[in-house]
């Protein structure tokens, strides 16, 4: 799903979702507009599209094992 759909599911804003993705709180696959998967999402400054799976959303909702 897209980041917008994930936001709706998680009840968070897009800004929060982006932060979560960068910090690993929410997992997803960052893809460039050309379709290539981003090699280093934390360092990459390119505008890109996040692809988030159902599992990623469920894990973000679940009590964190990392202990925030
Ligand atoms: Zn990149």
Image (cartoon, rainbow, N blue to C red):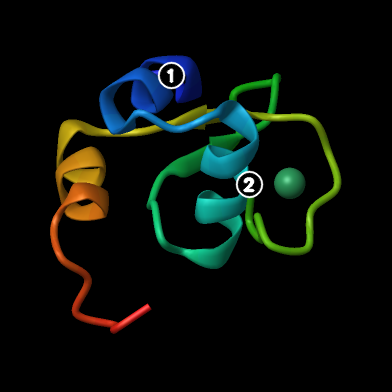
Q: Quadrant of the N terminus?
A: top left
Image point (59%, 23%), residue name: 35
68 horizontally vs 32: left or right: left
The quarter of the picture where the C terminus appears is: bottom left
Label 2 sits on a secondary structure element that is loop
Q: Are marks 1 and 2 in contact (CB under 8 Å)?
A: no
Which mark's residue is nearer the viewer, 1 or 2? 1
* Above-or-below relation of 11 to 64: above
Asked which secondary structure carries label 1, the reply is: loop
**Which residue is identified by label 1?**
2
61 displayed left or right of 31: left
Task: Decide: is 49 above or below 56.
Answer: above
Marker disc for residue 38: 2
x and y, in percent, of residue 52 in the image: 36, 33
Tell me where residue 41 appears, x and y as whole percent. Answer: 65, 55
Asked whether mark 2 lies closer than 8 Å to ligand 1, one says yes
Q: Residues within 10 Å of mark 1 (few under 14, many from 20)?
A: few
Q: In the picture provided, is 57 more to the left or to the right than 22?
A: left
Which one is nearer the viewer's eye here, 60 or 50? 60
Q: Is residue 25 above or below residue 56?
A: below
**Which image quadrant for residue 18?**
top right
Residue 16 image offset from top left, x and y in percent: 57, 42
């Amino acid at each position: 799903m897209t980041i917008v759909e994930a936001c709706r599911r998680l009840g968070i804003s897009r800004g929060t979702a982006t932060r979560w993705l960068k910090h690993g709180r929410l997992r997803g696959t960052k893809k460039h507009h050309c379709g290539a998967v981003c090699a280093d999402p934390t360092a990459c400054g390119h505008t890109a599209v996040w692809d988030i799976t159902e599992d990623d959303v469920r894990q973000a909702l679940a009590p964190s094992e990392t202990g925030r």
